[in-house]
Structures are given as structure tokens and as C-alpha cells.
Amino acid sequence: MLSDWNSLSEDLQLVLAREALLRAAETIAGQAETLAQEMEAGCLEDRGGPDALRLFAAVVRVTGQDNFVPAGQA
């Protein structure tokens, strides 16, 4: 197992970085969805947030898919 980022090939670094960004975007979107559900369930004060959070989640997901092109496709 490689323990040093710099010892990885550039292609592998790009693949790993892209995957990390996609996972981060999905995590953020998932948290927005959870917050929306909590507001709808009355666990958090609703200030018009569920719809805004779902929109935010959708934008994060779509933006992430469009901007993270495969390695070598710059």
C-alpha cells in the first residue's frame, strides 16, 4: 500500500481526487436532504428551508457530475 501521495502516478492522483470530490459532493447533498427531512418532521425549525435544501442538494449533485471529467479529458 502506498502511503505517500507524491509517490502515486499523476493519473492515479487525478482519479482519487475526482472520487474524493464526488463523495464529498454526495455527502453534502445527503446532509442537505437529511436537514430537509428533519425540518419537515418538526425536529428543526422550518424557515422555508426544506425546498431550498433540496434545491441545494440537486445543484451540488449536478454540478459535481458535470465538472469532474475523467482523467486525461482536461
Image (spheres, rainbow, N blue to C red):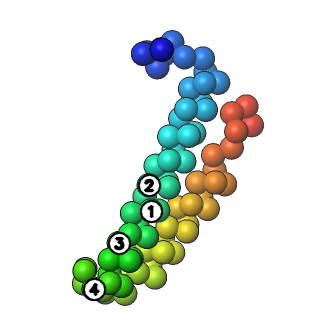
Q: Are marks 3 and 1 in contact (CB under 8 Å)?
A: no
Q: Amino acid at mark 2?
A: Thr
The residue under label 4 is which amino acid type?
Gly
Front label number (4 vs 2): 4
Element under disc 2: helix
Mark 4–mark 2 Cα distance, whole angstroms, equals 23 Å
Gap in Å between the C-alphas at discs 3 and 1?
A: 9 Å
Q: Earlier in the sequence, mark 3 or mark 1?
A: 1
Q: Which residue is mark 4?
A: 42
- Say which of 6 and 46 sits in front: 46
Asked whether the beta carbons under mark 4 and mark 2 sit within 8 Å of each other, the answer is: no
**Closer mark to the observer between disc 4 and disc 3:** 4
In the rendered image, the quadrant that contains the C terminus is top right
Element under disc 1: helix
Relative to residue 46, is residue 10 drawn left or right?
A: right
Q: Earlier in the sequence, mark 4 or mark 2?
A: 2
Residue picked out by circle 1: 30
In percent of width and height, residue 19 lies at 56, 40
Residue 44 percent coordinates (x, y): 25, 80
Q: Which residue is mark 3?
A: 35
Contact between marks 2 and 1 (CB within 8 A): the answer is: yes
Residue ID for mark 2? 27
Q: Secondary structure at mark 3?
A: helix
Instruction: Using the image, determine if residue 30 lies above or below residue 47.
Output: above
The picture places residue 15, in percent across and down from the top left corner, at 61, 32
Q: Are marks 4 and 1 in contact (CB under 8 Å)?
A: no
User: Is mark 4 in CB contact (under 8 Å) with mark 3?
Assistant: no
Q: Amino acid at mark 1?
A: Gly
Tell me, for residue 62, which label it has, or none: none
